[in-house]
Structures are given as C-alpha cells and as structure tokens.
Image: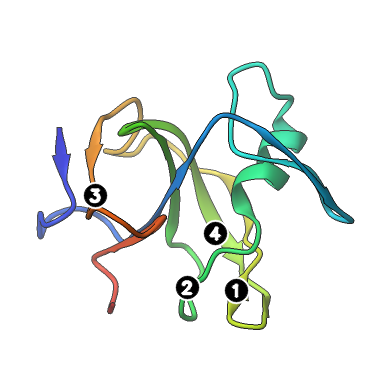
Amino acid sequence: MLDSNADDLPPAVVVKVTSPQSVDEPDRRYVGWSIDMPDDVAEAATSRWWPVPAIPQGTLLVVSLATIVVRVRRIVGAPRTQGRAAFSTVAAEHTIYDNARIKTRPGPVVDLIALDR
C-alpha cells in the first residue's frame, strides 16, 4: 500500500470518490466513478470542482475509490472558480500509482502528495 507520507512519491492530487451519483450540472451528469463509465463521462465525473490551491501543470490526478486507485491522469490545466478547480487532463503513462492501494489522510476528499499543503 502506498503511504501518502512517502517522500519519494511524485506530486499528485489524490481525490476520493464514491460510486456514481447523479447531479444536475451543466458540465457533467455524475460525480464519482464506475468501471462501466465511458472515458468522457469518467473524466467529467472525477475531475471537476475540487477544493484545492493552484496546482502546477504536469501534476498527477489520482482518483481513489475505497483506497483503490481507479484512475490516474496528468493535469494539463486547472481553471478555478470560487476556490475550486476543474482539471483538464490527459492520459498518464505508467505511474507508481497505477492499480495501487493508497493510504490518505482521513476526512477531506482531497489529499496533496509532494505538493505544498
């Protein structure tokens, strides 16, 4: 299991999601993740409106569901509105996070690894 306190992990924003929940928003129909989601739906459902500080391009977006990493993307943009970011991402080539279990801090739905908190 990866430990979010490890100094050797690459910079990442780890977001904790649940199974998909319907939402009535103009840019997405769901929040959460499911293996059955088409990629464009999963992108919108996992990359929008996270309460984070400014995040550098190239940082990894790591999506976890019950401590299991289900999606890893590379952030190429992060427009912010009212203190929340809507990440634009591209595929991330093989990373240490792929198919891993990850231990994050309890509580918040976002954990920053190797980034200023």
Vertical relation: 111 (above or below) 77: above
Q: Position of residue 41 (x, y in %)?
A: 75, 35
Q: Is residue 101 left or right of residue 51?
A: left
Kind of residue at disc 3: Thr
What colouring does the structure picture have?
rainbow
Mark 1 or 4, closer to the camera: 1
Sequence-earlier tag: 2 or 1: 2
Q: Check disc 2 and report its element: helix, strand or loop.
A: loop
Few, some or many residues within 10 Å of mark 2 (<14, 14–19, 20+) = some
When the figure is inspected, residue 94 is found, relative to residue 88, above or below; the finding is: above
Going from the N terminus, do you reach mark 3 or mark 1 first?
Answer: 1
**Which residue appears at 49% of the width and 80% of the height?**
54
Mark pair 2, 4: CA separation:
13 Å
**Are the residues tagged 2 and 1 within 8 Å (C-beta)?**
yes
Q: CA distance from mark 2 to mark 1?
A: 6 Å
Q: Which residue is mark 1?
A: 84
Instruction: Please state the horizontal and vertical placement of residue 10, each as a whole percent of the image.
Output: 26, 56
Q: Residue at x 34, y 25 (%)?
A: 99
The amino acid on which the numbered mark 4 sits, given as a three-letter code, is: Ile
Q: Quadrant of residue 98?
A: top left
Identify the residue position indicated by label 2 in the image: 52
> On residue 40, which mark appears?
none
**Does residue 92 sit above or below 58 in this rendering?**
above
Instruction: Please give the label number shown on residue 104.
Output: 3
Residue beneath disc 4: 75
Q: Earlier in the sequence, mark 1 or mark 4?
A: 4
Question: Viewed as shown, does residue 43 lie left or right of 62?
Answer: right
Q: Earlier in the sequence, mark 4 or mark 3?
A: 4
Observer-side mark, 4 or 3, equals 3
Residue at figure coordinates x 24%, y 49% from the top left? 104
